[in-house]
Amino acid sequence: MVERLKNHDRIADERVLAAMRAVPRHIFVPEVLTGKAYDDHALPIEAGQTISQPFIVARMTELLELERDARVLEIGAGSGYQTAILAHVAGQVFAIERLPELARLAQARLRRLNIHNAVVTCFDGTLGWNAHAPYDAALVAAGAPAITESLITQLKIGGRLVMPIGERRDAQRLIRIIKTEHGYDQEDYGACAFVPLIGRHGWSEAK
Ligand code: SAH
């Protein structure tokens, strides 16, 4: 999996590749899918959600440009796989997941892997997590209808926010935002498809 990320997908950040090598993805997928855990696909997980494709996990982590002591906010922890990768690369990870069953499972998996610099909590992540702000970086793993200003507010100047944004619930562009003194810069990293971000500053629950 890691060779493909490096040679085919052009993931260049050695610390991201090391994290992808270190974290066993099969721990984060339902048992019946263990055999597919190292294929480069998103897979269904509990509660009708998905574990992101390894390539997109690596790409988003790389785009955050994390220092070893970085403080990171993650929204949409899902299985906890992305959380574990972030915890390997950064200093502290504060992860939010709106579905209690997933939050509980994700936290248990992190504990099982002896990852102690990440917490997963359950609430609406579109509000961010002000108690631990400001963050060096923030990652949203679900598709939002628009840029979530509340998350930019919680970033340090120079901080990075990577999130999928799209006018449709099922198709987005991967956007990186860099906070500046007076606002923010925005870059587009291409098409992607995430499950919808549901909450106050996201989509409504009903389809
Ligand atoms: N990176 C995760 C992706 C999980 S899918 C992984 O690889 O496992 C996205 C997750 O975002 C889902 O679990 C969904 O429940 C969650 N989500 C959607 N809206 C949310 C919100 N407002 N706050 C927190 N989590 C949210």
Image: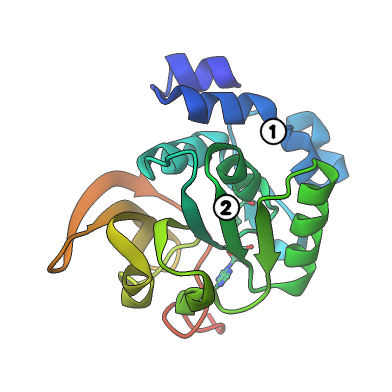
Label drawn at residue 92: 2
Q: Quadrant of residue 10?
A: top left
Colouring method of the image: rainbow
For residue 60, side relative to residue 195 (left or right): left
Q: CA distance from mark 1 to mark 2?
A: 16 Å
Kind of residue sitting beneath label 1? Val
Please tell me which of labels 1 and 2 falls first in the chain. 1
Q: Give residue 106's position: percent from left, percent from top.
A: 75, 56
Q: Is residue 195 above or below residue 190?
A: below
Q: Is residue 15 above or below residue 80?
A: above
Residue at the limit of the structure toward the front, as seen here: 69
Which of the four quarters of the rendered structure image does ligand 1 lie in? bottom right
The front one of 185 and 156 is: 156
Residue at 74% across / 64% down in the picture? 102
Label drawn at residue 81: none
Residue at the limit of the structure toward the left, as seen here: 182
Q: How many marks?
A: 2
The residue tagged with tag 1: helix, strand or loop?
loop
Residue at 85% across / 45% down in the picture? 112
The front one of 97 and 18 is: 18
Residue at 74% across / 32% down in the picture? 24
Q: Give residue 2's position: percent from left, percent from top.
A: 57, 20
Which quarter of the figure is the N terminus placed in? top right
Q: Give residue 32's position: percent from left, percent from top.
A: 86, 41
Residue hosting label 1: 23
Residue at 54% across / 14% down in the picture? 3
Kind of residue sitting beneath label 2? Gln
Around disc 1, counting alpha carbons within 10 Å, would you say few (fewer than 14), some (14 to 19), or many (20 or more)? some
The front one of 186 and 36 is: 186
